[in-house]
Image (cartoon, rainbow, N blue to C red):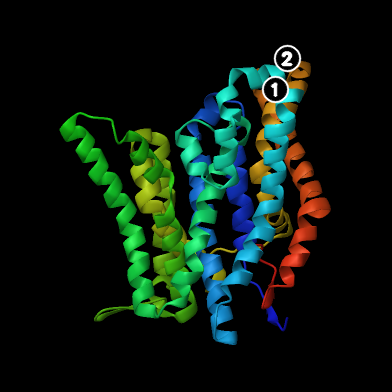
Amino acid sequence: MSQVNRIYLPNLNSLRGIAALMVIFSHLPADKFILAFKNFGTIGVTIFFTLSGFLISYLLQVEAKEFFTINVKNFYIRRILKIWPLYFLILFFVYILYPHIFPSWYDTEQERFSAKSLLMNIFFLTNVTLILKLTPFIIRVIWSIGIEEQFYLILPWIMKVEEKRRIFILFALIFLLPFSKLFLVLYQKITASDSLQIISSIITVTRFDCMAIGVLFGILSFSKEIKLGRFIIKQQYFTKKEVQITIYALALIFVLITIIVPSLFNIINYVVLPWLFAIIISNLATNKESIFHLENKVFNYLGKISYGMYLLHEFVILMLLPLVLPYLVDLPSFIKSFIGYLIAFGLTIIISHISFYCFEIQFLKLKNKVSYFKTSNEY
């Protein structure tokens, strides 16, 4: 397949690596220090969702501009080759092998290993199994993978429609889910009924609105402006130095608020942070005058193996780390925790490195055969 020159959006691999570290950090064995940052993992996932929407929409626009179309079939094939191999390998291990290797753990959560649970996760209904408590604890992180796959089913079709309709659809996604959630909450309070609690919870974790915000800024960063009726939103409004400083300051302030006032976490993480992160991502990726630069070999490398880090770190924390901690029992609590954290991060990186270079990369090579262009941003 003919290809245009290599496309690389700077800083995004590094940001993905940082987001993966945030998720791992939040899942480490809890102590007073970790508990203060327990929501960092969810914030990291918000970064993942926003970044994914931004990057993929940007690259689809490159494809549409260079080749006058978006090949939906090839898009789906690329997503399958990127996501499915490691995902289904993990499902095989957890549902087929895990119960025999760790029967005592299996006995404590048998319902989570049911055929119903497996079937729903095979079809990427992971947001549903999460809320129904049908996801084995060791792979609880897969909830976000299913949501991304669901969103990818509709994204190329959204990107193929003309701009005015495309922007309307995105704003509908951005506001429809939060307002649906608000309606359900009000309904439950007025009727004193929790009959719709499951639906409300599923809507809450289905972060299409977050990904749509990323897509919106992917379009803005590529096209440089978006028309909203009589109004025109230009990318340059968000690239000025003083605007960047304000956005970074607001992001820091709101993250600190989630630590100090945990009760405000959901409203900040679901409503405020995606917009701030989208502006930050846009500047990092496409603004040559970005006030921050995350490019470095370490974070770039972590970003490359971040998919494995995200899916595999719980195996390290729940299966391998407990084998080591008893040998540290005589150490002071702080030192014991610090060494445990280093071991958890270190083993996760080693296993993810092996997963990427011995397994995932074989499928990524195939992915290049159905790509119109080469990109060093893994997506």
**Residue at image point 26% right, 41% down:** 184
Q: Secondary structure at mark 2?
A: loop
- Marks 2,1: beta carbons within 8 A: yes
Q: In this orientation, which residue lies closer to the viewer: 77 or 141?
A: 77
Whether residue 248 is visible, yes or no, is no
Whether residue 123 is visible, yes or no, is yes
Up the image or down, 154 lies above or below 166; here it is: above
Q: Which residue is mark 2?
A: 329
Up the image or down, 166 lies above or below 104; here it is: below
Q: Position of residue 103 (x, y in %)?
A: 71, 19
**Residue at image point 42% right, 68% down:** 216
Up the image or down, 237 lies above or below 259; here it is: below
User: Is residue 127 found left or right of 167 in the rendered image?
Assistant: right
**Dividing the image into 4 quarters, which one contains the N terminus?**
bottom right
Q: Which mark is residue 254?
A: none
- Determine the image quadrant of residue 186: top left
* Residue type, label 2: Val
Q: Residue at the left extreme?
A: 190
Q: In this orientation, which residue lies closer to the viewer: 283 or 119?
A: 119
User: Is residue 11 found left or right of 218 in the rendered image?
Assistant: right
**Residue at image point 55% right, 34% down:** 116
**Residue at image point 65% right, 65% down:** 77
Q: Which residue is mark 1?
A: 336
Up the image or down, 276 lies above or below 124; here it is: below
Q: Position of residue 104 (x, y in %)?
A: 68, 16
How far is mark 2 from mark 1, CA to CA?
A: 7 Å
Q: Residues within 10 Å of mark 2 (few under 14, many from 20)?
A: few
Q: Residue at the right extreme?
A: 358
Q: In this orientation, which residue lies closer to the viewer: 191 or 51?
A: 191
Q: Residue at the top extreme?
A: 330
* Residue type, label 1: Lys
Q: Position of residue 300 (x, y in %)?
A: 69, 58
